Amino acid sequence: MQIMLFYKNMMFFKVSFLIAEMLISFSTFCESNNEQRHTTELQSFCT
């Protein structure tokens, strides 16, 4: 029982860490895209 609880906690931390990493990379991608102004589609999607 204790091992399952520990495993669930580890999975939760891994998933939340992955989501946070994706959000950070996505926000930096939007910032660089706004600076370069290559495509208007991604700009409107980011804002």
Image (tube, grey):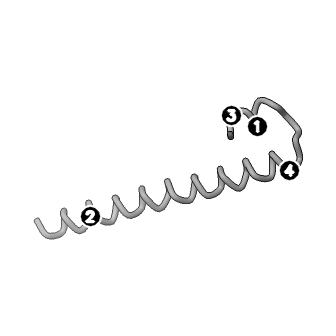
Decide: few, some or many residues near mark 4? Use Cα within 10 Å; few <14, some 14-19, many ≥20: few
Q: Mark 3 falls on what kind of element?
A: helix
Q: CA distance from mark 3 to mark 1?
A: 5 Å
User: Which residue is label 3 attached to?
Assistant: 45
Amino acid bearing label 1: Gln
Q: CA distance from mark 4 to mark 3?
A: 15 Å
**Residue at the image point whose x is 34% and y is 59% from the top:** 12
User: Which residue is label 2 attached to?
Assistant: 7
User: Which residue is label 4 attached to?
Assistant: 35
Q: Nearer the viewer, residue 38 or 10?
A: 38
Question: Would residue 11 be found to the left or right of residue 37 on screen?
Answer: left
Q: CA distance from mark 2 to mark 3?
A: 37 Å
The quarter holding residue 7 reads bottom left
Amino acid bearing label 4: Glu
* Percent coordinates x, y for residue 19 in the rendering: 49, 53
- Mark 3 or mark 2, which is nearer the start of the sequence? 2
Label pair 3/1, CB-CB below 8 angstroms:
yes
Q: Mark 2 falls on what kind of element?
A: helix
Q: Quadrant of the N terminus?
A: bottom left
**Residue at the image point whose x is 18% and y is 68% from the top:** 3
Q: Mark 4 falls on what kind of element?
A: helix
Decide: few, some or many residues near mark 1? Use Cα within 10 Å; few <14, some 14-19, many ≥20: some
Q: Mark 1 falls on what kind of element?
A: helix
Of badges 2 and 1, the one in the foreground is 1
Label pair 2/1, CB-CB below 8 angstroms:
no
